[in-house]
């Protein structure tokens, strides 16, 4: 139904307007109370308690959410003066040809999730940083005093000069991340962010190359397909007949503009769903999926078992393999590598006399051989079928092998490049024009960079560190193999101290540093360890354009909705001003070519110029958009209409375009990996097999020795009520979900644990205190604790908030995947108190309303 | 029980007198409003991902602190590992045809709109006695301690009056929550994305663990989960 229909119907159904209704009704006179009390009759009415400005009496400004969640949804600010009164979202009105209620298959509304909808409470939260602050207590103690911008920036600039001259060009560690600044101009990111370019141009920077979310998956996509753009647009899911959600929970992550919604449409078309996951997630229930519980970290083994069954029954698509794949079998090996292992013979057990049969896999992964066979048959014989191999199972020791194994399954069944199939992987789809900021060689992070979760190891052991221990990127400004001497950290849009692995080790390391600078719009657990806190304007307080980087094809204009709160400035203002302080007009102008020194005070015109240039040169010119910038600003959103659903590799399959790999084929056997002879000289540090293989993880439930001490496997997926650690301080959201550890009912019974009991989860690396949630929806032996809770350490170093990274291992996988989900631990009841938030309020338990037994 | 607690109150000892008093009270304070058209909600219990965007949109619109929730997405789960199931039941105020809350209000703050049957509380008349809270079988009225009043969902009357739909409906990422004329929704004759055409026969007035709709005739209809059906035939209209 379109908007006008609804309006007409509504008007017709109302017949009277509200005013005439109130005049004629006898309702007010009903207010006579029993017991002799007489109240003067008065009309009862809505919103009588305060002046309630209706939406149409407020100023409407279209903007968007700006977090690192993989999606990008519209927020519409309704403001009075300079105050945002409430937020709404896309209702179909804000696009070209829009109308209230317009919500079509091609141009669906991009409706914000619960996190986005809560943004007003984050914007005006007590945790907002309003002034520059300088630390007065010990690191982590949280004692700061207010400073002027001048004093704070002078302090930072002075320290930078000192560290650079004393310790050389690697002394400052860039730990920016995509926390809160995802826009085309104001970008905070590990790759190509504003901070990286600033430190690079300054000539003192160590970068962090592995991406916490998906490094294993990224590696697999690059090695196998030669690109990370292996994704379909979200609407393509509506065309699948079978969707296997492997460790994927779009009901929590959302993962794209309308991914979850298009999957609902697929379901209505008769698509079947399967979930392979240790938890029966809300995605499983909403899509009515067949749940296959699996032991964490054993995904590659199960997939190998599926591949075996497919080969054994000749269900593979040999035509597709012969045409497009390298190394799937002996016949598709390159001539120079005929003596190397190929995938099929590995699966059949030719090299080690161990066929990777469903029975073999069942022993490892805890899924019955029958179920493995059944799923293999479903996947091989349903066309088209989407095996969505998500990132989470890749955040493991050898997580890259799981993703490569998935790619092998996708390729052998010919589900690549077809509508309704899936080659994801990373899953990045439609390519947005993402760069409006000045871009040059300094934006490139790949020199003098280390695996991101090895910084503490580097600091604690310097100079006795081997390059392979820290994943040192070859080459490097200071010379190949030179171990960085890290003496300071910069954070931009990043709460990495709270979010990287093994926090206790980070605490030791940070106390060795001479400078820690944190740019953020709120205080964060990381901020507590900083020397200087620089208050950053939120995306409501600066001009930008939002782009979805994962799925969805649209741009959302993001004007300055309100003036920056307090003395907050944008990151670009801060780095521009620092550049002027460090290197005078030369550095200042090079860093921000459109600005003068007064940019720190007046940034509107310069930001507008950057954005207009980006729109006109890139969007209008490269992407053939005809809408002028001014018109785009008026509407608020530009939705692209694609000629056909965007499906990765469609041209490769249909038109024979070669893949971007060295061989031009889908490389199940990677020529690049087969040719390294000294792995210590690579960024990986350790050998990675040329074909996907199951490799025993550092710790998992199959490890008899380690499980004797720590019998549970802990996984830490993305929560729904936070974007990583962002929003942990929002009371509204903590009401929707309590930080708690999920445990299977039979396990809990043995330990005498009931829902709501406070428990301690522990291993040799740390201890956390959280309430327990006892359920049948979790696999026995597995605990689930969502990442991102703000650490709240007691005097014994026990985290009362329940951040799983107190327990994780800072040993990355060779390809760089963080081993976030490779954790063994114990669990026991405790008398210690849990602290759900820094404000120390208890939250209502609203998660499970009724248990229906 | 009540009789034992106040043994000396002669009025309370006589059940007939009590009934008579309630009847009189109801008549005095409340003339039932029969709306020209009753609006109500539809929610798909299965396809709802339980994201609670609807809840937060509502809290933001109504300026609620943490605590009171006009809209409540309830999570139901059952079964035994690994044969488990889960679904959501999403309810705010049901703007009942015969609201239980309304006659309990001693100040007449609660009223029902003639044109669309919306039940609302005038907060300037509310004295925070919390009687409606106790009377409602669905937990809709929410006490707000900071203001010492009870407040609840008013179906976003301002948006309805402006020709738009409520915030929660417009927030739903899955398009499984909607409003419309309740009789049409119940018949499955109203164009809504909340249900697929083939789900028409899954529409129910009541789901498991929910209070008996006979109490107040709530204006809500659900696409129920197979495990959420009550063991009763579908109510006739
Ligand atoms: S649901 Fe409760 S509060 Fe709402 S009208 Fe019915 S009885 Fe009143
Ligand atoms: S209709 Fe309005 S007041 Fe009622 S639950 Fe929805 S958003 Fe809240
Ligand atoms: S917004 Fe929609 S999908 Fe999310 S909880 Fe509410 S009704 Fe369910």
Image: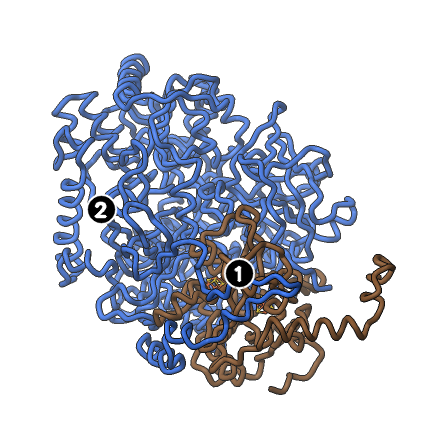
**Spot occupied by residue A378 in the image (x, y as percentages of width and height):** 54, 71
Residue drawn 37% across the image and 72% down it: A19
| Marked residue chain, label 2 | A
Q: Which chain is in blue here? A: A
**Res. A61 image quadrant:** bottom left
* Residue B93 left/right relative to A703: left
- Quadrant occupied by the C terminus of chain B: bottom right
Say if residue A551 shows up in the picture.
Answer: yes
Kindly identify which residue carries mark 1.
B152
Q: Tell me if residue A378 comes above or below residue B71 in the rendering.
A: below
- Disc 1 packing (10 Å; few <14; some 14–19; many ≥20): many
Residue toward you, A234 or A481: A234
Beta carbon at label 1 within 8 Å of ligand 1: yes
- Quadrant occupied by the N terminus of chain B: bottom right
Q: Secondary structure at mark 2?
A: loop
Say if residue A453 shows up in the picture.
Answer: no
Q: Which chain is in brown here? A: B
Q: Tell me if residue A520 comes above or below residue A741 in the rendering.
A: above
Kindly identify which residue carries mark 2.
A435
Q: Secondary structure at mark 1?
A: loop
Residue toward you, B27 or A726: B27
């Amino acid at each position: 139904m379109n908007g006008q229909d609804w309006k007409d119907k509504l008007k017709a159904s109302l017949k009277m307007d509200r005013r005439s209704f109130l005049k004629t009704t006898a309702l007010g006179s009903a207010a006579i109370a029993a017991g002799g009390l007489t109240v003067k009759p008065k009309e009862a009415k809505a919103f009588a308690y305060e002046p309630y400005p209706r939406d149409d009496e407020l100023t409407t400004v279209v903007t968007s959410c700006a977090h690192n969640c993989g999606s990008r949804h519209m927020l519409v600010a309704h403001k009075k003066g300079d105050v945002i009164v409430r937020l709404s979202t896309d209702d179909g009105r804000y696009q070209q040809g829009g109308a209230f209620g317009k919500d079509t298959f091609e141009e669906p509304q991009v409706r914000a999730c619960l996190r986005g909808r809560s943004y007003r409470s984050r914007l005006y939260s007590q945790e907002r940083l309003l002034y520059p602050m300088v630390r007065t207590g010990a690191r982590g103690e949280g004692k700061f005093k207010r400073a002027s911008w001048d004093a704070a920036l002078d302090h930072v600039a002075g320290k930078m000069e000192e560290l650079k001259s004393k310790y050389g060009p690697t002394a400052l560690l860039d730990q920016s991340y995509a926390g809160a600044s995802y826009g085309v101009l104001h970008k905070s990111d590990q790759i190509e962010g504003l901070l990286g370019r600033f430190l690079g141009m300054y000539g003192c920077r160590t970068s962090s190359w592995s991406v916490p979310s998906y490094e294993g998956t990224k590696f697999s996509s690059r090695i196998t397909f030669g690109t990370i753009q292996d994704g379909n647009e979200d609407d393509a899911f509506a065309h699948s007949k079978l969707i296997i959600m492997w460790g994927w929970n779009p009901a929590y992550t959302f993962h794209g503009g309308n991914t979850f919604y298009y999957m609902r449409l697929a379901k209505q078309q008769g698509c079947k769903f399967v979930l392979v996951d240790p938890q029966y997630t809300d995605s499983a229930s909403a899509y009515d999926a067949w749940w296959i519980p699996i032991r964490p970290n054993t995904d590659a083994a199960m997939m190998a078992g599926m591949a075996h069954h497919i080969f054994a029954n000749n269900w593979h698509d040999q035509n597709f393999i012969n045409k497009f794949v390298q190394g799937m079998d002996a016949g598709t090996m390159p001539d120079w590598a005929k003596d190397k292992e190929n995938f099929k013979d590995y699966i059949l057990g030719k090299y080690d006399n161990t066929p990777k049969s469903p029975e073999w896999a069942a022993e490892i992964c805890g899924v019955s051989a029958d179920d493995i066979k059944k799923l293999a048959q479903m996947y091989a014989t349903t066309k088209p079928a989407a095996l969505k191999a998500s990132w989470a199972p890749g955040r493991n020791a050898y997580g890259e092998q799981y993703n490569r194994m998935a790619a092998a399954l996708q390729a052998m069944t010919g589900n690549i490049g077809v509508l309704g199939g899936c080659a994801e992987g990373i899953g990045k789809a439609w390519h947005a024009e993402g760069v409006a900021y000045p871009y040059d060689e300094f934006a490139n992070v790949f020199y003098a960079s280390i695996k991101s979760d090895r910084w503490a190891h580097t600091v604690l052991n310097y100079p006795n560190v081997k390059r392979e221990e820290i994943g040192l990127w070859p080459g490097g400004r200071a010379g190949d193999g030179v171990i960085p001497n890290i003496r300071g950290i910069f954070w931009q849009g990043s709460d990495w101290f709270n979010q990287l692995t093994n926090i206790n080790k980070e605490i030791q390391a940070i106390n060795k540093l001479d400078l820690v600078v944190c740019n953020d719009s709120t205080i964060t657990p990381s901020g507590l360890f900083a020397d200087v806190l620089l208050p950053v304007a939120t995306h409501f307080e600066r001009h930008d354009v939002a782009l979805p980087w994962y799925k969805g094809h649209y741009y959302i204009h993001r004007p300055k909705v309100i003036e920056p709160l307090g003395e907050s400035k944008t990151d670009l203002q801060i780095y521009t001003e620092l550049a002027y302080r460090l290197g005078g007009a030369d550095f200042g102008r090079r860093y921000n070519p459109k600005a003068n020194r007064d940019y720190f005070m007046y940034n509107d015109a310069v930001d507008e110029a950057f954005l207009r240039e980006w729109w006109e040169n890139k969007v209008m010119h490269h992407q053939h958009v005809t809408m002028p910038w001014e018109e785009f600003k008026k509407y608020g959103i530009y939705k692209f209409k694609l000629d056909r659903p965007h499906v990765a590799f469609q041209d490769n399959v249909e038109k024979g375009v070669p893949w971007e790999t060295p061989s031009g084929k889908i490389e199940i056997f990677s020529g690049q990996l087969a040719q390294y002879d000294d792995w210590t000289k690579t960024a990986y540090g350790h050998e990675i097999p040329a074909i996907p293989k199951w490799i025993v993880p550092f710790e998992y439930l199959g490890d008899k020795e380690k499980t004797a001490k720590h019998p549970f496997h802990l996984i830490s997926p993305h929560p729904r009520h936070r974007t990583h650690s962002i929003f942990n301080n929002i009371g509204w959201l903590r009401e929707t979900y309590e930080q708690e550890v999920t445990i299977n009912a039979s396990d809990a019974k043995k330990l005498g644990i009931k829902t709501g009991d406070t428990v301690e989860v522990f291993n040799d690396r740390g201890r956390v205190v959280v309430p327990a949630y006892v359920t049948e929806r979790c696999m026995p032996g597995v605990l689930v604790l969502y990442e991102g809770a703000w650490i709240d350490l007691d005097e014994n170093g026990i985290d009362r908030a329940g951040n799983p990274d107190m327990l994780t291992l800072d040993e990355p996988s060779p390809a760089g995947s963080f081993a976030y989900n490779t954790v063994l631990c114990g669990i026991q009841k405790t008398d210690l108190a849990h602290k759900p938030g820094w404000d120390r309020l208890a939250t209502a338990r609203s998660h499970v309303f009724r248990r229906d037994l | 029980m009540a009789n034992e607690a106040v043994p000396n109150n002669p009025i309370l000892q006589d059940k007939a007198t009590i009934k008579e008093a309630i009847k009189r009270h109801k008549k005095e304070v409340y003339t039932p409003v029969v709306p020209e058209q009753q609006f109500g909600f539809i929610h798909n219990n299965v396809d709802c991902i339980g994201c609670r965007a609807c809840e937060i949109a509502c809290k933001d619109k109504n300026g609620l602190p943490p605590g009171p929730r006009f809209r409540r997405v309830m999570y139901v789960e059952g079964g035994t590992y690994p044969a488990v199931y889960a679904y959501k039941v999403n309810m705010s105020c049901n703007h009942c045809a015969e609201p239980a809350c309304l006659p309990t209000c001693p100040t007449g703050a609660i009223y029902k709109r003639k044109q669309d049957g919306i039940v609302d509380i005038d907060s300037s008349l509310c004295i925070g006695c919390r009687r409606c809270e106790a009377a409602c079988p669905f937990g809709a009225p929410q006490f707000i301690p900071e203001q010492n009043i009870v407040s609840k969902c008013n179906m976003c009357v301002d948006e309805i009056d402006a020709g738009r739909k409520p915030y929660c409906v417009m927030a739903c990422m899955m398009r499984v929550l909607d409003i419309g004329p309740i009789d049409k929704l119940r018949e499955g004759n109203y164009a809504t994305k909340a249900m697929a055409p083939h789900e028409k026969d899954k529409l129910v007035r009541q789901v498991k663990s929910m209070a008996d709709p006979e109490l107040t005739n709530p204006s809500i209809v659900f696409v129920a989960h197979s495990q959420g059906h009550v063991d009763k035939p579908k109510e006739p209209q």
